Amino acid sequence: MKLISIPTMAVVVLASSALHAQTQTRQSSLHRTTAPIQGTYNMTTGFEIGTPTYRSGPATIFDNTDGIGYYFSTLSNTEEWIDTAAFAATELNGMEQINGFEFNYCSLLSGPGTVSVEVRFYNDCITGSGPTGWDSGGTIQNAACAYALAGLPGGGGPFGISCFNINIDLMCGFECSVPQEQTPGGTTDFVGIGWMYMDSLASGSTGPTLGSLIGQTTPGYGSQDFFELMDLAVVGAEHQGTFNFGGKPKAQATFDCVLYGDGILDTDVVNADIPNTSDVLCLSSDMEFRSGNAVTWALDDLGGTAIFPSAAYAMLVGTNGSSAGFGSLAGPGTTLLVDPGSLVTPPTPLVMSGVVPAVTTPNLPGLPPTIWAQAMGFNGGIGAGNAAEASNALRHNN
């Protein structure tokens, strides 16, 4: 592999890693990065240059960045590079939910809207073979979640290269749940993060910013200095091996990435499998719905404009629910996610608090093992068939 320093074009041959004897050194060029430009990618409106305004987080659940971007590496548009992460065993249901992420990439392409990136999260990633069920005869299967990010900017900056820091907001409809580790503290149960750079104008011109050995801090939990390389062009033998970048002098085989979650233990967002036309509300809570807590639930709308046209808002609370929904019993165009036969109280009104509907419970008594909550906007009175808007559900485990 050749290491290319853009200002000097000095060439350094990377040595094979002594730590992972079975890994291979990636035989492609590394390029020096430039200072990244910030941008936000909204899953419904696309890419915008500028400081992020997304609602993801507020908790950082994985971070393998070290603040120093020295090199990036390019890959062909048939390759997927799969890195690893792990999550501490903190949730009763054994799952971690991602509600946003950010990543860095650089491109040699010129012009806006020339880069498309596909990001996938996998339930596992086995060293030496990749995610379970991936190899499927020229197609990618078995991803827990997949995101196609089209219309990202290309290069054109100094030396023909531009680099970008992209923030992705997954809240209110695009969250992804993946397993936490089964062995607490063992960092042995990995999830996979797959990256494909689908350049629309050329192949092999764009790729991720790599981790650095210069000023390195503690890497992200479960991050390893190698990755699995899959190539869709090699049908029947897509797994090309486990690769690194040779370690020293500066490049590590980790791809800069930060993952965000809500930081609320044992509470998960559940979205409708097939959203309906009036599933336009976003329900959130400020803490676990657990005995002794005083929980505040609040609504937002998917556009972030805080415009609530319904006459009244209320929340349904039950012991069962389903992402497949229970039809449109609540109202036309809405998906009822809480089982109407499991309601523990009548619908609880959400009162306008500032510019959003919200409700705060008193300190909660003992609760059943699982509680589902969903908000609705009603016209014509709070009752069956009158809902005009519906939110996601929140599932609380106690």
Image: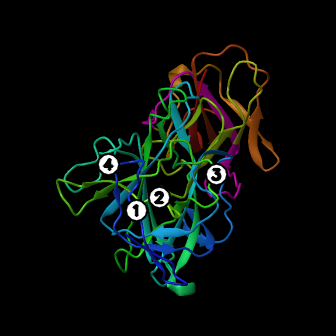
Q: Residue at x 62, y 46 (%)?
A: 282
Res. 245 in view = yes
* Farthest top residue in view: 366
The numbered dot on residue 67 is none
Measure how far apart labels 2 and 1 are at the Cα level. 8 Å
The answer to whether mark 2 and mark 1 are in CB contact below 8 A is: yes
- Location of the C terminus by quadrant is top right
Q: Which tag, 3 or 2, sits closer to the chain's start?
A: 3
At label 4, the amino acid type is Gln
| The image quarter in which residue 382 lies | top right
Q: How far across and how far down the image is residue 197, in percent?
A: 40, 67
Say which of marks 3 and 1 sits in front.
Answer: 1
The numbered dot on residue 22 is 4
Task: Please report the bounds of the magenta region as a residue range.
Answer: 299-327
Q: Residue at x 49, y 69 (%)?
A: 72
Q: Residue at x 66, y 35 (%)?
A: 264
Q: Which tag, 3 or 1, sits closer to the chain's start?
A: 1
Q: Which residue is mark 2?
A: 247
At label 1, the amino acid type is Ala
The numbered dot on residue 217 is 3
